[in-house]
Image: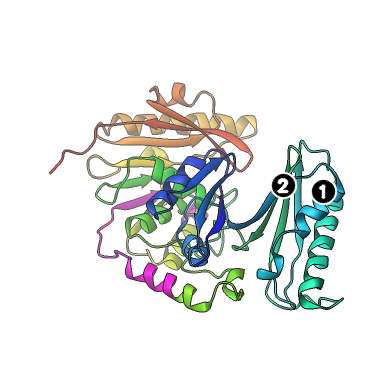
Amino acid sequence: MNELQLIATAPMGLESIVARELRELGYTDQHVENGRVTFTGTYADIPRCNLWLRTSDRVLVKMGEFPATTFDELFEGTKALPWEQWIPANGEFPVEGRSHNSQLSSVPACQGIVKKAIVEKLKQSYNTEWFEEIGARYVIEVNLLKDKALLTIDTTGPALHKRGYRKIATEAPLKETMASALVQISRWNPTRPLYDPCCGSGTILIEAAMLGWNIAPGMRRSFPSEHWHMVPQKLWKDAREEAFDLVRDDEPLELTGSDIDPRAIEVAHAAARSAGFEREIKFYNIPASQVKPQGDYGCLITNPPYGERLSEIAEVEKLVRQLGRVADQLPTWSFFALSPTKQFEHYFGQKAEKRRKLYNGRIECQYLQFLGPLPPRH
Protein backbone atom coordinates (compact mmCIF):
# COMPACT_ATOMS: atom_id res chain seq x y z
CA MET A 1 0.00 0.00 0.00
CA ASN A 2 1.17 3.53 -0.70
CA GLU A 3 2.64 5.43 2.23
CA LEU A 4 0.78 8.55 3.36
CA GLN A 5 1.67 11.44 5.59
CA LEU A 6 -1.11 11.69 8.16
CA ILE A 7 -1.64 14.33 10.84
CA ALA A 8 -3.33 13.77 14.19
CA THR A 9 -4.32 17.20 15.47
CA ALA A 10 -3.96 17.77 19.20
CA PRO A 11 -5.49 20.21 21.69
CA MET A 12 -2.87 22.56 23.10
CA GLY A 13 -0.87 20.77 25.80
CA LEU A 14 -1.88 17.26 24.74
CA GLU A 15 0.58 16.76 21.86
CA SER A 16 2.74 14.33 23.86
CA ILE A 17 -0.32 12.28 24.88
CA VAL A 18 -1.46 12.00 21.24
CA ALA A 19 2.11 11.01 20.26
CA ARG A 20 2.15 8.33 22.97
CA GLU A 21 -1.18 6.96 21.78
CA LEU A 22 0.18 6.75 18.24
CA ARG A 23 3.31 4.92 19.45
CA GLU A 24 1.15 2.42 21.33
CA LEU A 25 -0.78 1.83 18.10
CA GLY A 26 2.55 1.14 16.34
CA TYR A 27 3.21 4.48 14.61
CA THR A 28 6.80 5.25 15.58
CA ASP A 29 7.75 7.37 12.55
CA GLN A 30 6.30 10.64 13.86
CA HIS A 31 7.07 14.32 14.24
CA VAL A 32 5.53 16.33 17.11
CA GLU A 33 4.75 20.03 16.68
CA ASN A 34 2.44 22.54 18.34
CA GLY A 35 -1.11 21.32 17.82
CA ARG A 36 -0.32 18.25 15.74
CA VAL A 37 1.61 15.00 15.33
CA THR A 38 2.60 14.07 11.78
CA PHE A 39 3.18 10.35 11.16
CA THR A 40 3.57 7.85 8.35
CA GLY A 41 0.72 5.50 7.54
CA THR A 42 -1.28 3.82 4.79
CA TYR A 43 -4.88 3.99 3.61
CA ALA A 44 -5.76 1.32 6.20
CA ASP A 45 -4.55 3.61 8.96
CA ILE A 46 -7.22 6.22 8.21
CA PRO A 47 -10.02 4.06 9.67
CA ARG A 48 -7.76 2.59 12.35
CA CYS A 49 -6.65 5.96 13.75
CA ASN A 50 -10.14 7.47 13.56
CA LEU A 51 -11.49 4.54 15.57
CA TRP A 52 -8.73 4.39 18.19
CA LEU A 53 -7.35 7.86 18.94
CA ARG A 54 -8.75 9.08 22.27
CA THR A 55 -7.15 12.52 22.73
CA SER A 56 -6.72 13.76 19.15
CA ASP A 57 -9.29 16.08 17.56
CA ARG A 58 -9.10 14.75 14.00
CA VAL A 59 -7.02 12.83 11.46
CA LEU A 60 -5.89 14.68 8.33
CA VAL A 61 -4.21 13.59 5.10
CA LYS A 62 -1.23 15.83 4.47
CA MET A 63 -1.39 16.77 0.79
CA GLY A 64 1.60 19.10 0.73
CA GLU A 65 3.52 21.96 2.29
CA PHE A 66 5.31 24.79 0.49
CA PRO A 67 6.33 28.47 0.83
CA ALA A 68 3.54 30.92 -0.09
CA THR A 69 4.18 34.63 0.18
CA THR A 70 2.06 35.55 -2.87
CA PHE A 71 -1.25 34.38 -4.31
CA ASP A 72 0.63 33.07 -7.37
CA GLU A 73 2.80 30.85 -5.16
CA LEU A 74 -0.27 29.61 -3.30
CA PHE A 75 -2.10 28.88 -6.57
CA GLU A 76 0.77 27.07 -8.28
CA GLY A 77 1.77 25.14 -5.16
CA THR A 78 -1.80 23.96 -4.66
CA LYS A 79 -2.31 23.04 -8.31
CA ALA A 80 0.83 20.90 -8.29
CA LEU A 81 -0.62 18.52 -5.69
CA PRO A 82 -2.35 15.22 -6.70
CA TRP A 83 -5.96 16.18 -5.92
CA GLU A 84 -7.31 13.90 -8.66
CA GLN A 85 -6.07 10.87 -6.70
CA TRP A 86 -8.44 11.73 -3.86
CA ILE A 87 -11.36 13.78 -5.19
CA PRO A 88 -13.68 12.11 -7.74
CA ALA A 89 -15.45 14.05 -10.49
CA ASN A 90 -18.60 14.41 -8.36
CA GLY A 91 -16.82 14.95 -5.03
CA GLU A 92 -17.75 17.84 -2.74
CA PHE A 93 -14.64 19.78 -1.72
CA PRO A 94 -15.23 22.88 0.43
CA VAL A 95 -12.11 24.78 1.48
CA GLU A 96 -11.50 26.06 5.00
CA GLY A 97 -8.57 28.20 6.03
CA ARG A 98 -6.42 29.74 8.73
CA SER A 99 -3.57 32.25 8.60
CA HIS A 100 -1.10 33.26 11.29
CA ASN A 101 2.01 35.41 10.97
CA SER A 102 1.85 35.27 7.17
CA GLN A 103 1.84 37.87 4.39
CA LEU A 104 -1.26 36.17 2.97
CA SER A 105 -3.46 37.20 5.86
CA SER A 106 -6.89 37.27 4.17
CA VAL A 107 -8.34 33.84 4.87
CA PRO A 108 -11.32 34.16 2.46
CA ALA A 109 -8.97 35.19 -0.36
CA CYS A 110 -6.67 32.23 0.34
CA GLN A 111 -9.64 29.85 0.41
CA GLY A 112 -10.76 31.17 -2.98
CA ILE A 113 -7.29 30.76 -4.50
CA VAL A 114 -6.97 27.18 -3.23
CA LYS A 115 -10.43 26.27 -4.50
CA LYS A 116 -9.67 27.74 -7.92
CA ALA A 117 -6.33 25.89 -8.13
CA ILE A 118 -7.95 22.54 -7.24
CA VAL A 119 -10.71 23.11 -9.83
CA GLU A 120 -8.09 23.81 -12.50
CA LYS A 121 -6.24 20.61 -11.59
CA LEU A 122 -9.42 18.53 -11.67
CA LYS A 123 -10.45 20.06 -15.01
CA GLN A 124 -7.27 18.62 -16.51
CA SER A 125 -7.95 15.19 -14.99
CA TYR A 126 -11.66 14.86 -15.72
CA ASN A 127 -11.88 16.91 -18.93
CA THR A 128 -14.87 18.91 -17.73
CA GLU A 129 -15.60 22.56 -16.97
CA TRP A 130 -18.23 21.99 -14.27
CA PHE A 131 -18.23 20.01 -10.99
CA GLU A 132 -21.59 19.29 -9.39
CA GLU A 133 -20.11 18.40 -5.97
CA ILE A 134 -22.93 16.01 -5.05
CA GLY A 135 -20.78 13.04 -4.01
CA ALA A 136 -18.59 12.17 -1.01
CA ARG A 137 -17.30 15.08 1.06
CA TYR A 138 -13.60 16.07 1.16
CA VAL A 139 -13.03 19.04 3.46
CA ILE A 140 -9.77 20.76 2.50
CA GLU A 141 -7.91 23.11 4.81
CA VAL A 142 -5.22 25.63 3.89
CA ASN A 143 -3.21 26.51 6.98
CA LEU A 144 -0.78 29.41 6.54
CA LEU A 145 1.87 29.80 9.23
CA LYS A 146 4.92 32.04 8.85
CA ASP A 147 4.50 32.21 5.05
CA LYS A 148 4.32 28.44 4.65
CA ALA A 149 1.14 26.78 3.36
CA LEU A 150 0.03 23.37 4.65
CA LEU A 151 -2.80 21.72 2.70
CA THR A 152 -4.74 18.82 4.15
CA ILE A 153 -7.92 16.78 3.67
CA ASP A 154 -9.99 16.02 6.76
CA THR A 155 -10.84 12.31 7.16
CA THR A 156 -12.78 12.72 10.42
CA GLY A 157 -15.68 15.15 9.98
CA PRO A 158 -17.15 16.16 13.36
CA ALA A 159 -14.26 16.23 15.85
CA LEU A 160 -13.22 12.97 17.51
CA HIS A 161 -14.50 14.05 20.93
CA LYS A 162 -18.00 13.41 19.56
CA ARG A 163 -18.04 9.73 20.49
CA GLY A 164 -21.80 9.34 20.14
CA TYR A 165 -22.74 8.33 23.69
CA ARG A 166 -23.50 11.80 25.07
CA LYS A 167 -26.95 12.73 23.75
CA ILE A 168 -27.45 15.57 26.24
CA ALA A 169 -24.91 17.51 28.28
CA THR A 170 -24.57 19.56 31.42
CA GLU A 171 -23.52 23.21 31.32
CA ALA A 172 -19.86 23.66 30.17
CA PRO A 173 -19.20 19.91 29.78
CA LEU A 174 -15.66 18.54 29.68
CA LYS A 175 -14.76 17.28 26.21
CA GLU A 176 -14.35 13.52 25.94
CA THR A 177 -10.82 13.93 24.52
CA MET A 178 -9.74 16.00 27.53
CA ALA A 179 -11.43 13.60 29.97
CA SER A 180 -9.52 10.70 28.45
CA ALA A 181 -6.27 12.68 28.70
CA LEU A 182 -6.85 13.35 32.41
CA VAL A 183 -7.28 9.62 33.02
CA GLN A 184 -4.25 8.70 30.92
CA ILE A 185 -1.99 11.24 32.67
CA SER A 186 -3.08 9.93 36.07
CA ARG A 187 -1.82 6.69 37.56
CA TRP A 188 -5.20 4.99 37.20
CA ASN A 189 -5.57 1.49 35.77
CA PRO A 190 -8.51 -0.94 35.92
CA THR A 191 -7.19 -2.61 39.08
CA ARG A 192 -7.67 0.61 41.07
CA PRO A 193 -10.88 2.32 42.23
CA LEU A 194 -11.72 5.63 40.52
CA TYR A 195 -13.94 8.35 41.97
CA ASP A 196 -15.09 11.70 40.55
CA PRO A 197 -16.84 13.87 43.20
CA CYS A 198 -17.84 16.55 40.63
CA CYS A 199 -18.79 14.13 37.89
CA GLY A 200 -21.17 16.37 35.89
CA SER A 201 -22.26 14.31 32.90
CA GLY A 202 -19.92 11.45 33.89
CA THR A 203 -17.42 11.92 31.08
CA ILE A 204 -14.24 11.16 33.06
CA LEU A 205 -15.72 7.91 34.36
CA ILE A 206 -17.06 6.82 30.96
CA GLU A 207 -13.71 7.51 29.28
CA ALA A 208 -11.97 5.53 32.04
CA ALA A 209 -14.36 2.64 31.44
CA MET A 210 -13.56 2.72 27.71
CA LEU A 211 -9.85 2.65 28.53
CA GLY A 212 -10.34 -0.11 31.08
CA TRP A 213 -12.18 -2.32 28.63
CA ASN A 214 -10.00 -1.29 25.66
CA ILE A 215 -12.97 -0.02 23.67
CA ALA A 216 -12.09 2.01 20.58
CA PRO A 217 -13.79 5.41 21.16
CA GLY A 218 -14.81 5.84 17.51
CA MET A 219 -16.78 2.58 17.33
CA ARG A 220 -20.19 4.28 17.73
CA ARG A 221 -19.90 6.93 15.02
CA SER A 222 -19.37 7.43 11.30
CA PHE A 223 -16.77 9.35 9.30
CA PRO A 224 -16.86 11.07 5.89
CA SER A 225 -13.87 9.01 4.72
CA GLU A 226 -16.04 5.87 4.95
CA HIS A 227 -17.42 7.02 1.57
CA TRP A 228 -14.08 7.68 -0.13
CA HIS A 229 -12.98 5.48 -3.04
CA MET A 230 -9.38 5.70 -1.74
CA VAL A 231 -10.40 4.02 1.54
CA PRO A 232 -12.38 0.91 0.49
CA GLN A 233 -15.19 -0.37 2.71
CA LYS A 234 -13.14 -3.50 3.44
CA LEU A 235 -10.56 -1.40 5.29
CA TRP A 236 -13.29 0.04 7.52
CA LYS A 237 -14.80 -3.41 8.05
CA ASP A 238 -11.41 -4.87 9.01
CA ALA A 239 -10.65 -1.98 11.38
CA ARG A 240 -14.01 -2.29 13.14
CA GLU A 241 -13.66 -6.07 13.44
CA GLU A 242 -10.17 -5.64 14.92
CA ALA A 243 -11.51 -3.12 17.43
CA PHE A 244 -14.40 -5.41 18.36
CA ASP A 245 -12.05 -8.37 18.89
CA LEU A 246 -9.80 -6.34 21.20
CA VAL A 247 -12.55 -5.38 23.69
CA ARG A 248 -11.89 -6.73 27.20
CA ASP A 249 -15.32 -6.43 28.81
CA ASP A 250 -14.58 -9.10 31.42
CA GLU A 251 -12.30 -6.67 33.31
CA PRO A 252 -13.91 -5.72 36.67
CA LEU A 253 -14.17 -1.95 37.16
CA GLU A 254 -14.68 0.14 40.31
CA LEU A 255 -15.95 3.47 38.98
CA THR A 256 -18.01 5.89 41.05
CA GLY A 257 -19.17 9.45 40.54
CA SER A 258 -21.18 11.96 42.54
CA ASP A 259 -22.44 15.49 42.09
CA ILE A 260 -24.48 17.96 44.12
CA ASP A 261 -26.66 18.71 41.06
CA PRO A 262 -29.44 16.10 40.59
CA ARG A 263 -29.82 17.11 36.93
CA ALA A 264 -26.15 16.28 36.34
CA ILE A 265 -26.65 12.81 37.80
CA GLU A 266 -29.59 12.23 35.45
CA VAL A 267 -27.44 13.23 32.48
CA ALA A 268 -24.56 11.05 33.71
CA HIS A 269 -26.85 8.03 34.08
CA ALA A 270 -28.14 8.55 30.53
CA ALA A 271 -24.63 8.88 29.08
CA ALA A 272 -23.34 5.79 30.91
CA ARG A 273 -26.36 3.81 29.74
CA SER A 274 -25.81 4.97 26.15
CA ALA A 275 -22.11 4.03 26.35
CA GLY A 276 -22.93 0.56 27.71
CA PHE A 277 -21.64 1.09 31.27
CA GLU A 278 -24.89 1.38 33.22
CA ARG A 279 -23.86 -1.46 35.57
CA GLU A 280 -20.16 -0.59 35.77
CA ILE A 281 -20.45 3.04 36.95
CA LYS A 282 -22.27 4.05 40.14
CA PHE A 283 -23.58 7.61 40.53
CA TYR A 284 -24.75 9.41 43.68
CA ASN A 285 -26.44 12.78 44.18
CA ILE A 286 -24.45 14.02 47.19
CA PRO A 287 -22.28 17.07 48.02
CA ALA A 288 -18.49 16.77 48.22
CA SER A 289 -18.66 16.91 52.03
CA GLN A 290 -20.38 13.50 52.02
CA VAL A 291 -17.99 11.81 49.59
CA LYS A 292 -16.55 8.55 51.01
CA PRO A 293 -14.69 6.60 48.31
CA GLN A 294 -14.28 2.91 49.03
CA GLY A 295 -11.14 0.80 48.69
CA ASP A 296 -7.41 1.48 48.85
CA TYR A 297 -4.88 2.90 46.39
CA GLY A 298 -7.61 4.55 44.36
CA CYS A 299 -7.55 7.63 42.14
CA LEU A 300 -9.81 10.66 42.53
CA ILE A 301 -9.91 12.52 39.20
CA THR A 302 -12.11 15.57 38.85
CA ASN A 303 -12.80 18.80 37.00
CA PRO A 304 -14.46 20.92 39.71
CA PRO A 305 -16.58 23.98 38.85
CA TYR A 306 -14.46 27.05 38.13
CA GLY A 307 -16.69 29.93 39.20
CA GLU A 308 -16.80 33.33 37.51
CA ARG A 309 -18.83 35.58 39.83
CA LEU A 310 -17.68 36.39 43.37
CA SER A 311 -20.41 34.25 44.95
CA GLU A 312 -19.42 31.30 42.72
CA ILE A 313 -15.72 31.75 43.56
CA ALA A 314 -16.55 31.50 47.26
CA GLU A 315 -18.45 28.26 46.59
CA VAL A 316 -15.49 26.86 44.62
CA GLU A 317 -13.12 27.67 47.51
CA LYS A 318 -15.46 25.88 49.90
CA LEU A 319 -15.63 22.87 47.56
CA VAL A 320 -11.84 22.62 47.27
CA ARG A 321 -11.52 22.72 51.07
CA GLN A 322 -14.04 19.86 51.27
CA LEU A 323 -12.01 17.87 48.73
CA GLY A 324 -8.90 18.47 50.84
CA ARG A 325 -10.68 17.01 53.87
CA VAL A 326 -11.68 13.96 51.77
CA ALA A 327 -8.01 13.54 50.81
CA ASP A 328 -7.00 13.60 54.49
CA GLN A 329 -9.21 10.55 55.06
CA LEU A 330 -7.69 8.58 52.17
CA PRO A 331 -3.92 8.27 52.75
CA THR A 332 -3.40 5.62 50.03
CA TRP A 333 -5.28 7.50 47.30
CA SER A 334 -3.95 9.82 44.59
CA PHE A 335 -5.83 13.02 43.67
CA PHE A 336 -5.95 14.77 40.30
CA ALA A 337 -7.79 18.03 39.63
CA LEU A 338 -8.06 20.24 36.54
CA SER A 339 -8.60 23.83 37.66
CA PRO A 340 -7.80 27.44 36.71
CA THR A 341 -8.01 28.40 40.40
CA LYS A 342 -4.64 29.91 41.37
CA GLN A 343 -5.13 29.16 45.06
CA PHE A 344 -6.27 25.55 44.62
CA GLU A 345 -3.35 24.05 46.59
CA HIS A 346 -3.86 26.58 49.41
CA TYR A 347 -7.52 25.65 49.84
CA PHE A 348 -6.85 21.94 49.27
CA GLY A 349 -4.24 21.99 52.05
CA GLN A 350 -1.45 20.24 50.12
CA LYS A 351 1.22 21.06 47.56
CA ALA A 352 0.90 19.15 44.31
CA GLU A 353 3.77 16.83 43.38
CA LYS A 354 3.21 17.56 39.69
CA ARG A 355 1.50 20.28 37.64
CA ARG A 356 0.71 20.26 33.95
CA LYS A 357 -0.61 23.23 31.98
CA LEU A 358 -3.66 22.26 29.93
CA TYR A 359 -6.39 24.21 28.19
CA ASN A 360 -10.02 23.35 28.86
CA GLY A 361 -11.42 25.00 25.76
CA ARG A 362 -9.78 28.43 25.88
CA ILE A 363 -9.36 28.45 29.67
CA GLU A 364 -5.80 27.97 30.88
CA CYS A 365 -5.78 25.42 33.69
CA GLN A 366 -3.34 23.46 35.81
CA TYR A 367 -3.73 19.70 36.10
CA LEU A 368 -2.67 19.31 39.72
CA GLN A 369 -1.42 15.88 40.78
CA PHE A 370 -1.28 14.88 44.45
CA LEU A 371 0.38 11.48 44.32
CA GLY A 372 -0.25 8.84 46.95
CA PRO A 373 1.64 5.53 47.25
CA LEU A 374 1.47 3.03 44.42
CA PRO A 375 -0.36 -0.26 45.12
CA PRO A 376 1.91 -3.07 46.37
CA ARG A 377 2.97 -5.50 43.68
CA HIS A 378 1.42 -8.94 43.88
From the viewer's side, name the closer residue of 153 and 83. 83
**Residue at left offset 37%, top offset 25%:** 353
Q: Which residues are magenta?
A: 238-265
**Residue at left offset 83%, top offset 43%:** 104
Report whether residue 29 is seen: yes
Q: Quadrant of residue 243?
A: bottom left
**Tag 1 residue:** 73
From the viewer's side, name the closer residue of 105 and 219. 105
Q: Is residue 69 left or right of residue 213?
A: right
CA distance for labels 2 and 1: 9 Å
Q: Is residue 241 magenta?
A: yes
Residue 222: give x, y in percent of width and height: 55, 70
**Tag 2 residue:** 66
**Are the residues flagged by discs 2 and 1 in contact, CB closer than 8 Å?**
yes
From the viewer's side, name the closer residue of 178 and 312. 178
Residue 239: give x, y in percent of width and height: 43, 70
Residue 241's place in the image compared with 292, above or below, is: below
User: What crowding class fits label 1: few (fewer than 14 Cα within 10 Å), some (14-19), or many (20 or more)?
Assistant: some
Residue 327: give x, y in percent of width and height: 33, 32
